[in-house]
Image (spheres, coloured by chain):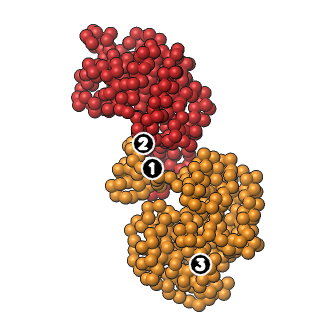
Chain colours: A red, B orange
């Protein structure tokens, strides 16, 4: 079983408008709502691929109720812990004229110390039979900066592998707890290391404690630095569409690969194919099966050099 | 007592962002929610001025629950009828860099015929002791086109005066029921009559059935065509700010004036002063007392000509 953690779960709302013009009024002609936050998107991809998965994290208030109702409708196992604050919404405004998306991300509810303490106990109680824990996204206000490090250690002690997809201080802090995989994108890597070079920055995160680093660079594919070797995996072609769900699809593939004990080249091929298959879909968490099957056999994986000393 | 009707009640949400840039992601640094829709804004202004007022209309779903909770917090008497659909939200994105507002209006829930039938009975039951009924804003999907005409007739039969503030077909249709006052703005007047000239267009609405027409033209003030004469009321100066609440403040003054049986020049002076006092406030339904008192004595009201035959 794979358990995904979304500490700042969201209700993702999509508005359709004719054309987005600042300083004017817009008639919203379509409204679409579903549960989101990166961990929930990862769970959606895993469930669609037939993997047993459960969703945990924090959700509360009227928005939390709506998002949990939607999880139930989607058939995702809901192990979210209720909190007093109202969960955040993210709003994507899509213009019909050019298909472009403009995004507004609310910060999220204030989490009380007692709620975080309850969550750590709740999380530990969910780990029986869990092979991989995915920790994705931002931390809501009020959480301690070492929140991900604490969960990585708890998961590790229970024998579960961990995949962390976050950025900034939350990412840096998690490294010290020795997560099995971290998946920053190129911008996040540069932000935490100050290095522009993806290979050098990824190697640095491994030195800081991650057992493996899989860095994503959009259409340039993945650069993986692991204890078993260093690889580059590149998609055969570039796709137009919505890249927001590609990172979550990549993480889903990494978690499924870790759970299956698959070799890295195979995991990376799957990760590039699933990432690409997210791009034609307007909503994060969705996968285009045609793209997936086409890419599955045409992703190129190249070993750059042999295992590095850790 | 004044009863305001908001058939498409909304939760008005305001997001603060640094700068609105289409096709980018924005961090929302402040989120503010309150009950809205034009009738609710009118009730807020009336309550703040000490007038006994109640709010009715239609609200439902999780958004309806949040907006009714906020009405309670604000101390407004809530006589909304619950419906199955989820009430709409309106979103105003305010940029900190220039103070400009960009607005997204959801359409509103589908109202079932049985819900509308329940509402007409509910509305009739609320009319005891009501001097003036205010009917404001758009109709949600599913309502008959003669919804406002029906309510105007019911109110009239119960001895209540009516003020209608809507646009397009809903306004045209309401005229036939003989509302006491309609308050279109210049653009709405042009849209329903095809005339650019405010005086001529306002006179035409009176011919179509309204007992009085008060047309608002922003900083140019009000043009009133009534059975007792025709007036122009002009503010002493132009104000910078948010004009969205000015129309609702104007309607509040018209309703209060009708309830008090005040003479038109006094009603119009009050309406221009309250409209102006809404402009410095970022949220519709709020009034700046300093502006109100300053304008109250300096609005110029000019009689254009003597009573017209109806």
B100 horizontally vs B165: left or right: left
Mark 3 touches mark 1? (CB < 8 Å)? no
Q: How far apart are marks 3 and 1 (CA)?
A: 35 Å
B64 horizontally vs A171: left or right: right
Work out whether residue B116 or residue B192 is closer to the camera in this orientation and state it.
B116
Snapshot quadrant of residue B37: bottom right
The residue located at (44%, 13%) in the rendering is A159
Mark 1 touches mark 2? (CB < 8 Å)? yes
| Residue A303 spot, x, y in % from top left | 31, 12
- Callout 3: SS: helix
B287 horizontally vs B170: left or right: left
Identify the residue under disc 3.
Answer: B257
Work out whether residue A294 or residue A189 is closer to the camera in this orientation and state it.
A189
| Residue B82 spot, x, y in % from top left | 68, 52
Identify the residue under disc 2.
Answer: A107
Identify the residue under disc 1.
Answer: B31
Mark 3, chain letter?
B
- Callout 1: SS: strand
The residue located at (26%, 19%) in the rendering is A207
């Amino acid at each position: 079983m794979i358990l995904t953690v979304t500490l700042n779960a969201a209700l993702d709302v999509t508005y359709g408008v004719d054309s987005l013009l600042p300083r004017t009024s817009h008639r919203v002609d379509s409204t679409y709502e579903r549960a989101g936050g990166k961990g929930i998107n990862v769970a959606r991809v895993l469930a669609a691929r037939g993997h047993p998965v459960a969703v945990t994290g924090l959700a509360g208030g009227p928005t939390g109720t709506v998002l949990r109702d939607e999880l139930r409708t989607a058939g995702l196992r809901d192990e979210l812990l209720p909190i007093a604050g109202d969960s955040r919404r993210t709003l994507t405004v899509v213009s019909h004229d050019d298909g472009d998306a403009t995004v507004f991300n609310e910060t999220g509810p204030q989490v009380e110390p007692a709620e975080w303490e309850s969550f750590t106990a709740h999380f530990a109680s969910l780990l029986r039979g869990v092979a991989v824990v995915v920790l994705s996204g931002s931390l809501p206000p009020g959480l301690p900066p070492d929140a991900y490090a604490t969960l990585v250690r708890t998961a590790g002690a229970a024998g579960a592998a961990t995949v962390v997809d976050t950025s900034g201080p939350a990412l840096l802090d998690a490294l010290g707890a020795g997560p099995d995989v971290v998946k920053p994108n190129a911008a996040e890597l540069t932000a935490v290391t100050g290095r522009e070079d993806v290979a050098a920055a990824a190697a640095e995160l491994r030195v800081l404690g991650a057992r493996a680093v899989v860095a994503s660079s959009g259409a340039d594919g993945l650069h993986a630095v692991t204890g078993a070797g260093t690889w580059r995996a590149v998609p055969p072609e570039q796709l137009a569409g919505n890249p927001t769900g590609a990172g979550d699809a990549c993480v889903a593939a990494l978690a499924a690969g870790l759970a299956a004990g698959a070799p890295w080249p195979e995991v990376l091929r799957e990760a590039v194919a699933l990432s690409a298959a997210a791009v034609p879909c307007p909503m994060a968490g969705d996968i285009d099966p045609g793209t997936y099957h086409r890419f599955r056999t045409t992703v190129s994986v190249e070993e750059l050099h042999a295992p590095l000393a850790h």
